[in-house]
Image: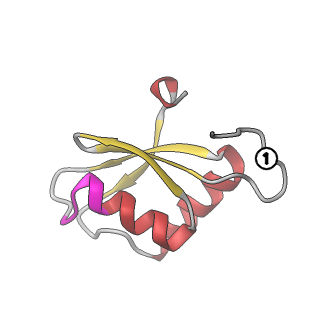
Amino acid sequence: MANTLDTILYIGKDGIGENTLRECEDALEARELIKGCVQQGCPLEAREALQELCEKTHAEPIQHIGRRFVLYRPSRENPKIVVE
C-alpha cells in the first residue's frame, strides 16, 4: 500500500520539532498510513526518525528504506485501513 504513497513528511536539518510532530499527527489522523523522508543534512537516519516519531505519536513502524520511512496509526475518528 505504501509504494504508491507520495512522501508528505520531511525531516530536515533541525530534526523532529513540535511543528513536525503536529504535522505528523494531523497526517496520521487524516491518512493513517504516511510516508516520510529524512533530508540531507538531517542529524537523524531514517530508522531513528521513524522510531522517534512512532514513540511520540503512538504509531507503528512499517518500514524504512534508505532515507524514506512509512508509519501507520489507525484514525481515532474514522479508521479505514486494517493492518494484520
Q: Residue at x 70, y 39 (%)?
A: 82
Quarter-of-image position of residue 44: bottom left
Q: Which amino acid does label 1 sit on?
A: Pro
Instruction: Please tell me how many numbered marks the rendered image carries.
Output: 1
Q: Residue furthest front?
A: 84
- Residues drawn in magenta: 43-48
Q: Is residue 68 placed above or below 1 in the rendered structure?
A: below
Q: What element carries label 1?
A: loop
Q: Residues within 10 Å of mark 1 (few under 14, many from 20)?
A: few
What is the quadrant of the C terminus in the image? Answer: top right
Left or right of 64? Residue 44 is left
Q: Is residue 83 placed above or below 52 in the rendered structure?
A: above
Left or right of 80? Residue 6 is left
Quarter-of-image position of residue 23: bottom right
Q: Name the residue under label 1.
A: 79
Left or right of 72? Residue 9 is left
Q: Residue furthest right?
A: 77
- Image coordinates of residue 53 in percent, x first then y, are 44, 65
